[in-house]
Image (cartoon, rainbow, N blue to C red):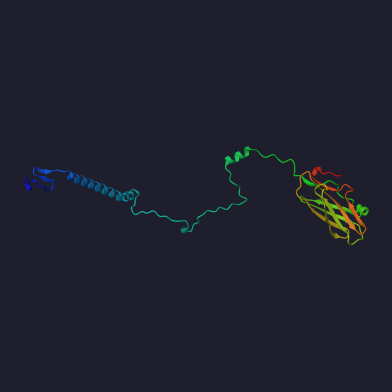
Amino acid sequence: MDPEQSLETRGPTGLTGPTGPVDNGLADSDEELDAAQDAARMRFMRERRRARSLPACTAALLGDGSARKRVQFADTLGLSLADVKHFNTTDEPLVPHAVLSRHRSFGAPAPQTHAQPALLPCFPEPVHAQKSVHEQRVALEKVQVTQFEVRGQVLTRTEDTHAAVFIRYTFNEWLSHVDAPALRVADGRHTFSVLVPPLWSASAVHFALLLRCAEGDFWDNNRGKNFSLRYGHAHARRDT
């Protein structure tokens, strides 16, 4: 075989041999690829033109194409950033009708028929202090009771200028007691004050008065019964 006859030459569309052109499919693939790239490029251009024309269409729909949105802040205009409302205690509160009607449906609370118990003396008011001081040299002249304090005034009869007056009191029925000195305010007159801690309603305060002088020790203990104060109501005061 002639070597020249078996030599293949490449043509513009494929390979050529002794019997004619040979098609290997590469040319058709290139053409399809080019067509796909052209189609994709056209779609991109159309979408790009559509995106660019959207602001113009929107502006045309809104009106003047030169109109722009303006944003202003309250502080730049001299306005307050917070609104503060001042309430007056004399103002009538605005309560919704539904809430007010529901509140009224519960009814008014029942009034309290019993007052809070107070510490009350269980002995009569000392009206014969002048007579008692001549008999026993010391006598309770008056007593005043508050919520947390018992105050009293004492008369004494002695020639001892160094005489002292004490009040002996207890909060636990004489399981223990305290002797507190009274304050001299004038010749023959002393005052005392006892702070009362919060006690149970069944508790009581008991006290007696002591005069200590050169003549001896003299007591005023309500004729052996002591001066007692118990919790109760004003109408339940007991005189013993």
User: Eyeballing the image, is 157 above or below 93?
Assistant: below
* Residue at x-position 61% and y-position 40%: 103
User: As rendered, which of 15 and 90 lies closer to the eye?
Assistant: 15
| Nearest the eye: 176 or 207 | 176
Residue located farthest toward the bottom when viewing the structure as drawn: 161
Residue 183 percent location from the top left of the image: 83, 58
Q: How many marks?
A: 0
Q: Is residue 147 left or right of residue 18?
A: right
- Residue 114 vertical placement versus 64 (above, below): above
Give percent across and percent down for residue 35: 21, 46
| Residue 4 coordinates in the image, percent (x, y) | 7, 48
Quadrant containing the N terminus is: top left
Nearer-the-camera pick, 224 or 234: 224
In the image as oriented, which residue stretches furthest toward the left? Answer: 2
Q: Position of residue 212 (x, y in %)?
A: 89, 57
Question: Up-down: is 169 above or below 23?
Answer: below
Horizontally, is 176 left or right of 218 in the view?
Answer: left
